[in-house]
Amino acid sequence: QVQLVESGGGLVQTGGSLRLSCAAGRGFSGNLMGWHRQAPGKRREWVASISSGSITNYAGSVKGRFTISRDNAKNSVYLQMNSLKPEDTADYYCAAGSGSIFRSTWFEWGQGTQVTVSS
């Protein structure tokens, strides 16, 4: 079982940046990892995935603005978010999964970190 703890959320103005971190427990380095988000009143949506070899995939709404990365030595995965928009406001969740960056099953979730983008 992989335990995940997110951090780095907060309040930022439109156009600003935030970097989310996810600290993972044992067994992290071999896992597909991803970030998801859930806005108020909406369903949770996938944001980005990264393979154990750091191959990445992004949702169209964040491509070119967000960057997912990982440091297997530190058991951590990151989400650098630039050019933030009010519609990026959501709770962001780190997840561990299986499969590929194009088709994944998520089996472990963090508790989430809140991101608010003011207009």
Image (cartoon, rainbow, N blue to C red):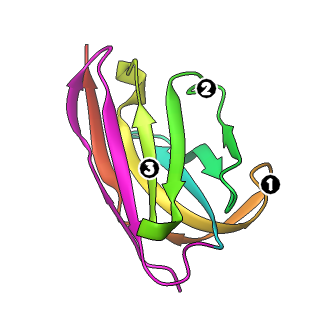
Closer to the eye: label 2 or 1: 2
Q: Give the numbered dot on residue 15.
A: none
- For marks 2 and 1, give the CA distance: 17 Å
Closer to the eye: label 3 or 1: 3
* Place of residue 63 in the rendered image (x, y in percent of width and height, measured from the top left): 61, 26
Q: Give the numbered dot on residue 103.
A: 1
* Callout 1 secondary element: loop
Position above or below: 20 against 93 = above
Question: Which three-letter amino acid code belongs to the residue tagged 3?
Answer: Tyr
* Place of residue 65 in the rendered image (x, y in percent of width and height, measured from the top left): 51, 23
Q: For this view, does 90 lie left or right of residue 2?
A: left
Residue at (67, 63) in percent of width and height: 52
> Of the residues under marks 2 and 3, which one precedes in the sequence?
2
Find out whether the residues at labels 2 and 3 contact each other: C-beta distance under 8 Å: no
Question: Which three-letter amino acid code belongs to the residue tagged 2?
Answer: Lys
* Place of residue 106 in the rendered image (x, y in percent of width and height, measured from the top left): 64, 66
Magenta region: which residues?
1-29
> Of the residues under marks 3 and 1, which one precedes in the sequence?
3
Q: Does the segment drawn in magenta span residue 4?
A: yes
Q: Give the numbered dot on residue 78.
A: 3
Near-viewer residue (73 or 83): 73
Position above or below: 46 against 7 = above
- For marks 3 and 1, give the CA distance: 20 Å
* Quadrant position of residue 4: bottom left
Closer to the eye: label 2 or 3: 3
Q: For this view, does 72 lie left or right of residue 105?
A: left
Q: Quadrant of the C terminus?
A: top left
* Callout 3 secondary element: strand
